[in-house]
């Protein structure tokens, strides 16, 4: 935005960096700022004037909160996105359904639309939904994503793009597969940024193979989230300015002009973790995956905290330890086996000849 925010779409068409910008902006809490209706809209400048970061609950302030606020200002000031209309803002969390869902639609001045889906927002229920992807045929969030784009793009013949970061990328791809045919045929690209993949039955389906040429997957050098399950395609690896898990956050991705800076291959650290987790998932049945997920989040819910940030505080540890001891025997057995498999697969990957 600093370098190329003054370049209109007429001079430089929509690109992969634009997709990440709009996908990242989807993390901003826009309740009361952007209308939920698809028939009403506001510009970035209008939305920014209405937005007050001080009113955002501290529990909703994710790690990129300050950077997202700065991005908001850059978008409001930019020539490139000046003509963009924002509409269809939805943000819901349903604990009973293990669903955390948020989406936003942009009407761009190149006569196209972009629907962005928010990734995991730091809530415990949001992270559990990520794990649910490993054994459920369809999560509540995925189902909601389908109905969202069917409503957003029910009329017109303009081109449509979808995108999302983290779990939002999974929602973007999944909704493109099962939306109405009248919507699907207008989708030109789906941008998935370090997002978890899909079970084999999805990857092998005819509709996934049909949409595959339109799917653009991007992951950082030490990707973990983006390597969970499969994507059916070779993702583009992006250089980052940091190491470890922080690479998942988009603000550390490097770029040149209007493209990401490519990396040759995944870093060893990320590869080890990926093989460890993937090995555990491949060895487990769907029932065992479900038991593992329910057991893990039963433990994490014990301190009665809503976000992972709160769970990392020392005051949460006694409740977590107590919850582990109260797991049923079959839960303890699956958890023990899971960590055993993670250790075995991780060690195997670490010492595998290059």
Image (cartoon, rainbow, N blue to C red):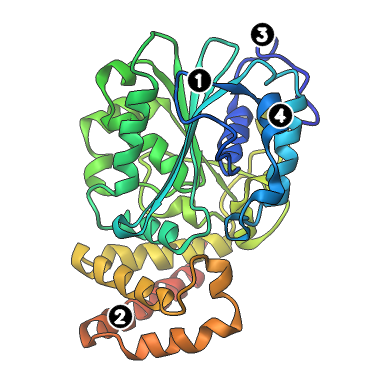
Q: Nearer the viewer, mark 2 or mark 1?
A: 1
Q: Earlier in the sequence, mark 1 or mark 3?
A: 3
- Quarter of the picture holding the N terminus: top right
The reply to whether residue 191 is in sight is no
State the CA–CA distance, disc 4 to disc 1. 20 Å
Picture layout, residue 276 above or below residue 173: below
Of the two numbered discs 4 and 1 on the same chain, state the one appearing first in sequence.
1
Which mark sits nearer the N-terminus, 2 or 1?
1
Residue at x 45%, y 14% (from the top left corner) = 159
Local crowd size for mark 4, using a 10 Å CA cut-off: few (<14), some (14–19), many (≥20): many
Q: Which SS class for mark 1?
A: loop
Q: Which residue is mark 1?
A: 40
Q: Which residue is mark 3?
A: 10
| Depth check, front residue: 94 or 235 | 94
Task: Determine crowd level at label 2: few under 14, some 14-19, many 20+ residues with C-alpha closer than 10 A.
Answer: some
| Residues at marks 4 and 1 touching, judged by CB atoms closer than 8 Å | no
Q: CA distance from mark 3 to mark 2?
A: 56 Å
Q: Which mark is residue 81?
A: none
Q: Nearer the viewer, mark 3 or mark 4?
A: 4
Cβ–Cβ under 8 Å for marks 3 and 4: no
Report which residue position mark 2 lands on.
Answer: 337
Residue, disc 4: 75
Gap in angstroms between the C-alphas marked 4 and 2? 48 Å
For marks 4 and 2 on the same chain, the one whose residue lies earlier in the sequence: 4
Residue density around tag 3, few if under 14, some if 14–19, many if 20 or more, within 10 Å: few
| Residue 350 % position (x, y) | 51, 71
Callout 1 touching callout 3 (CB < 8 Å): no
Q: Nearer the viewer, mark 3 or mark 2?
A: 3
Q: Secondary structure at mark 2?
A: helix
């Amino acid at each position: 935005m600093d370098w190329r925010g003054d370049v209109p779409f007429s001079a430089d068409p929509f690109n992969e960096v634009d997709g990440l910008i709009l996908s990242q902006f989807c993390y901003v809490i826009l309740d009361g700022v952007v209308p939920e209706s698809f028939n009403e809209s506001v510009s970035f400048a209008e939305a920014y004037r209405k937005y007050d970061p001080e009113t955002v609950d501290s529990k909703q302030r994710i790690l990129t909160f300050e950077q997202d606020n700065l991005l908001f200002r850059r978008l409001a000031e930019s020539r490139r996105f000046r003509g963009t209309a924002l509409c269809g803002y939805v943000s819901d969390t349903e604990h009973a359904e293990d669903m955390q869902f948020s989406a936003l639609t942009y009407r761009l001045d190149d006569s196209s639309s972009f629907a962005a889906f928010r990734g995991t927002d730091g809530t415990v229920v949001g992270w559990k939904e990520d794990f649910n992807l490993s054994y459920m045929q369809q999560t509540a969030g995925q189902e909601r994503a389908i109905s969202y784009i069917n409503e957003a793009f029910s009329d017109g013949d303009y081109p449509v793009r979808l995108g999302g970061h983290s779990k939002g990328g999974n929602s973007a791809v999944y909704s493109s597969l099962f939306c109405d045919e009248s919507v699907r045929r207008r989708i030109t690209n789906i941008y998935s940024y370090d997002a978890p993949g899909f079970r084999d039955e999805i990857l092998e389906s005819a509709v996934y193979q049909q949409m595959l040429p339109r799917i653009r997957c991007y992951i950082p050098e030490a990707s973990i989230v983006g390597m969970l399950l499969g994507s059916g395609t070779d993702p583009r690896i992006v250089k980052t300015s940091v190491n470890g898990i922080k690479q998942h956050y988009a603000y550390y991705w490097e770029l040149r002009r209007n493209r990401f800076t490519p990396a040759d291959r995944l870093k060893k650290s990320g590869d080890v973790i990926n093989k460890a987790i993937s090995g555990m998932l491949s060895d487990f049945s769907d029932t065992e995956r479900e038991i593992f997920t329910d057991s893990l989040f039963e433990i994490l819910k014990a301190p009665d905290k809503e976000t992972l940030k709160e769970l990392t505080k020392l005051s949460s540890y006694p409740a977590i330890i107590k919850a582990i001891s109260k797991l049923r025997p079959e839960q303890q057995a699956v958890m023990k086996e899971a960590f055993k498999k993670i250790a075995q697969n991780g060690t195997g990957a670490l010492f595998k000849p290059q």
